[in-house]
Image (cartoon, rainbow, N blue to C red):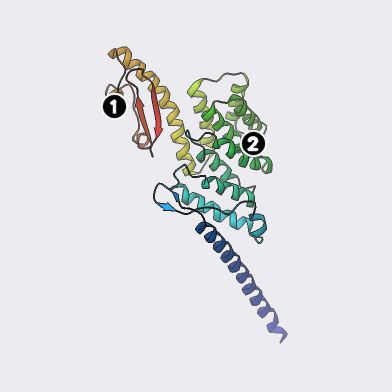
């Protein structure tokens, strides 16, 4: 009989473990579904849907020891919902609060939050993201990316040199930071900030360091936007010098070869020019 005791015990233990995992997933899925049903629907680019996440303060008490697995589930859901997110509903920031609560050493969600949550219409969100990012800065002491990306966003969105310099300094203190980090931090220290070039240089360091294609696309558009701002400023002035008046549209500038805009950029942004003053606005398409 002793010959069969070990296999039977082993099989029983496997079934027991499988039952525990199944029960855990069922509890989490049921809790999330109930929480979603109790909340009003939010609007996305694609359709109406429900998405209110379990509060992050509850997660330490209901993860049943599966915190890393649950963090991965939230991360997958974050990527899926990013496509449909309308950049207005705050549920998207809750994803990163939950992930950082479950797995504070998971670096990539911090970086993704820094680059996707803030927008020109909701600059204040950057401070909310900074609160989440601080957890990553504290728990991943070797990461130069989190403080550097955050400092870059503060410069791009607010032109706040103090906050940008604060986070760039944290990045420059990391031994594994690339040379571009030190060069850009030095520019802030000596106050050698030169408009769009500073923005481009800041983003270029991040673009070269990341391998994530979704993040690369976000950064590519950001870098292109900085270059286009300068191109438009110079193109409009050249048009005024040549024609004696300001252009009424980007099409006029392109027709006279003063600017060249990619189809990808025009698919994501609308450019409006004031024909009386020469000023212009670049807005994201809804």
Q: Quadrant of residue 265?
A: top left
The residue that appears at 32% across and 20% down in the rendered structure is 275
The percent position of residue 255, horizontal first and vertical second, equals 27, 24
Of circles 2 and 1, the one toward us is 1
The percent position of residue 192, horizontal first and vertical second, equals 57, 18
Image quadrant containing the N terminus:
bottom right
Image quadrant containing the C terminus:
top left
Q: Quadrant of residue 183?
A: top right
Of residue 20 and residue 169, the one placed in the foreground of this image is 20
Q: Residues within 10 Å of mark 2 (few under 14, many from 20)?
A: few
Local SS, label 2? loop
Q: Residues within 10 Å of mark 1 (few under 14, many from 20)?
A: some
Q: Is residue 235 left or right of residue 42?
A: left
Residue 238 drawn above or below residue 145: above
Local SS, label 1? helix
Per the image, the residue denoted by label 2 is 176
Of residue 262 and residue 150, the one placed in the foreground of this image is 150
Residue 62 drawn above or below residue 19: above
The residue that appears at 35% across and 37% down in the rendered structure is 267
The percent position of residue 125, horizontal first and vertical second, equals 54, 37
Per the image, the residue denoted by label 1 is 251
Q: Earlier in the sequence, mark 2 or mark 1?
A: 2
The residue sitting at the right extreme is 2
Of residue 285 and residue 164, the one placed in the foreground of this image is 285
CA–CA distance in space, label 2 to label 1: 46 Å
Label number found at residue 14:
none
The percent position of residue 73, horizontal first and vertical second, equals 55, 56
Residue 116 drawn above or below residue 240: below
Total marks in image: 2
């Amino acid at each position: 009989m002793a010959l069969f005791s070990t296999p039977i015990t082993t099989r029983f233990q496997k079934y027991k473990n499988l039952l525990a995992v199944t029960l855990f997933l069922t509890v989490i899925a049921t809790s999330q579904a109930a929480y979603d049903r109790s909340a009003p629907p939010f609007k996305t680019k694609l359709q109406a849907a429900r998405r209110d996440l379990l509060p992050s303060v509850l997660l330490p008490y209901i993860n049943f020891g599966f915190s890393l697995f649950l963090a991965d589930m939230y991360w997958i859901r974050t990527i899926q919902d990013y496509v449909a997110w309308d950049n207005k509903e705050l549920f998207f920031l809750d994803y990163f609060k939950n992930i950082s609560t479950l797995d504070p050493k998971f670096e990539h969600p911090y970086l993704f939050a820094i680059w996707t949550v803030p927008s020109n219409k909701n600059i204040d969100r950057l401070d909310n993201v900074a609160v989440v990012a601080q957890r990553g800065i504290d728990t991943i002491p070797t990461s130069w990316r989190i403080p550097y990306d955050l400092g870059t966003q503060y410069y791009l969105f607010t032109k706040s040199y103090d906050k940008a310099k604060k986070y760039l300094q944290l990045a420059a203190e990391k031994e594994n930071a690339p040379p571009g980090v030190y060069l850009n931090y030095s520019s802030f220290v000596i106050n050698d900030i030169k408009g769009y070039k500073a923005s481009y240089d800041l983003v270029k360091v991040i673009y070269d360091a990341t391998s994530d294609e979704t993040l690369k696309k976000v950064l590519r558009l950001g870098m292109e936007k900085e270059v286009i701002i300068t191109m438009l400023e110079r193109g409009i002035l050249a048009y005024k010098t040549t024609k004696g008046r300001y252009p009424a549209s980007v099409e006029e500038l392109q027709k006279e070869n003063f600017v060249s805009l990619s189809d990808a950029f025009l698919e994501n942004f609308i450019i409006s020019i004031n024909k009386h003053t020469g000023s212009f606005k670049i807005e994201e398409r809804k």
